[in-house]
């Protein structure tokens, strides 16, 4: 993989596709647009990718590779407390929304809705991206396990965090305002506080 990724033309094609799939969607993005943005010709494209679907799969792999260094570690560097780390991850999405005038949409969420259900290779990679995201959150929850009531389903709670992020981003993008995202995260924070209070109540 390192040899291919290091090739500047391939890297430009991937970056162009990432941007255009995010901005316009997969179906609405034409090959000519990808080539123009990447400053590449069709011969170069087909040297690296059999077709547009193969490019999509490669893009999804770059999201998987970039999750930890781009999304997780910057949030973790801000806090040592595992629960605060979870909300720092969510704060990162809030910053992306604000910096784009609430035009930002989670690229994986968008592709998950757009790509036809029959495209199993693409959905497998999307699911792996979601699984890696929730695994990072679950790791934080596991580190704070003793602060939650006995029997708390950490897998389900990690999934709830992902659902809150995706739903909040989707609604803020549609409304072009940050309030839906903030309201979603505020309710999640309230639920965390409820769980933590429940644990303290059982110890008193």
Image (cartoon, rainbow, N blue to C red):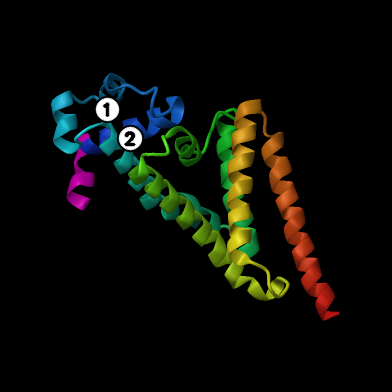
Residue 27, given in percent of the width and then of the height, sits at 38, 26
Residue 87, given in percent of the width and then of the height, sits at 63, 54
Above-or-below relation of 113 to 82 = above
Residue 61, given in percent of the width and then of the height, sits at 34, 47
Q: Which residue is mark 2?
A: 15
Q: Which residue is mark 1?
A: 38
Mark sitting earlier along the chain (2/1): 2
**Residues at marks 2 and 1 touching, judged by CB atoms closer than 8 Å:** yes
Taking the image as shown, residue 141 lies to the left or right of residue 194, namely left
Q: Residues within 10 Å of mark 2 (few under 14, many from 20)?
A: some
- Which of the image's four quarters has the C terminus? bottom right
The number of callouts visible is 2
Above-or-below relation of 75 to 180 = below
Taking the image as shown, residue 187 lies to the left or right of residue 35, namely right
Q: Is residue 176 visible from the viewing direction of this image?
A: no
Residue sitting nearer the eye, 129 or 7: 129
Magenta extent: 1-9
- Identify which residue is drawn at 57% across, 52% down: 89
Any magenta on residue 7?
yes
Q: Secondary structure at mark 2?
A: helix
């Amino acid at each position: 993989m390192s040899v291919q990724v290091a090739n500047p033309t391939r890297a430009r094609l991937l970056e162009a596709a990432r941007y255009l799939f995010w901005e316009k969607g997969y179906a609405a993005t034409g090959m000519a647009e990808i080539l123009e943005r990447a400053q590449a010709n069709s011969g170069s494209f087909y040297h690296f990718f059999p077709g547009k679907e193969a490019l999509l799969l490669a893009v999804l792999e770059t999201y998987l590779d970039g999750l930890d260094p781009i999304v997780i570690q910057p949030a973790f560097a801000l806090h040592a407390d595992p629960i605060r780390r979870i909300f720092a991850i969510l704060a990162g999405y809030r910053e992306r929304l604000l910096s784009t005038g609430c035009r930002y949409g989670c690229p994986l969420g968008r592709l998950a809705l757009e790509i036809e259900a029959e495209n199993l290779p693409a959905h497998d990679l999307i699911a792996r991206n979601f699984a890696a995201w929730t695994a990072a959150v679950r790791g934080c929850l596991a580190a704070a396990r003793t602060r939650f009531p006995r029997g708390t389903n950490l897998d389900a709670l990690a999934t709830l965090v992902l659902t809150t992020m995706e739903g909040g981003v989707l609604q803020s993008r549609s409304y072009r305002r940050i309030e839906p995202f903030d309201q979603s995260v505020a309710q999640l924070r309230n639920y965390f506080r409820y769980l933590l209070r429940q644990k303290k109540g059982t110890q008193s």
